[in-house]
Amino acid sequence: MGRPEFALDAGVFRRELLESGYEETSIAGSHAAAVAGLPDLHRDPFDRMLIAQAMVEGITLLTADRAVLAYPGPVRSAL
């Protein structure tokens, strides 16, 4: 996306997150099905999938994206 604050090696970043105890969440059919039930507040399909994953998995999604923050459920401001 050309954002300088994201200039990092994705492989190194992933490894460091996993070594710090973070877990990966794969996309499952239940996540895809949950996307269909989301209100049409945001058009970005990746963000909508993250919201659906948080809902299905019972985890909190932290974001600075105001459009994502408009969704009900486990979405909280990261700011």
Image (tube, helix red, strand yellow):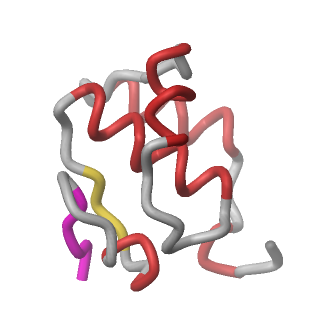
**What segment carries the magenta color?**
75-79
Q: Is residue 53 above or below residue 75?
A: above
Count of residue discs: 0
Q: In percent of the image, x 25 and y 73: which residue is there?
A: 78
Is residue 78 located in the magenta-colored stretch of the structure?
A: yes
Relative to the observer, which residue lies in front, 28 or 78? 28
Q: Is residue 1 left or right of residue 18?
A: right
Quarter location, residue 1: bottom right
Percent position of residue 31, x then y: 47, 27
Quarter location, residue 5: bottom right
Is residue 77 located in the magenta-colored stretch of the structure?
A: yes
Q: Is residue 53 left or right of residue 20?
A: right
Q: In percent of the image, x 34 and y 22: which residue is there?
A: 23
Percent position of residue 33, x then y: 51, 27
Relative to the observer, which residue lies in front, 4 or 39? 39
Percent position of residue 20, x then y: 28, 30
Image quarter (top left, top right, bottom left or bottom right) of the C terminus = bottom left
Q: In percent of the image, x 23 and y 75: which residue is there?
A: 77
Per the picture, the main secondary structure of the magenta-coloured stretch is strand
Percent position of residue 60, x then y: 20, 48
Q: Is residue 72 left or right of residue 67?
A: left
Q: Is residue 51 above or below residue 68?
A: above
Q: In percent of the image, x 52 and y 15: which residue is there?
A: 28
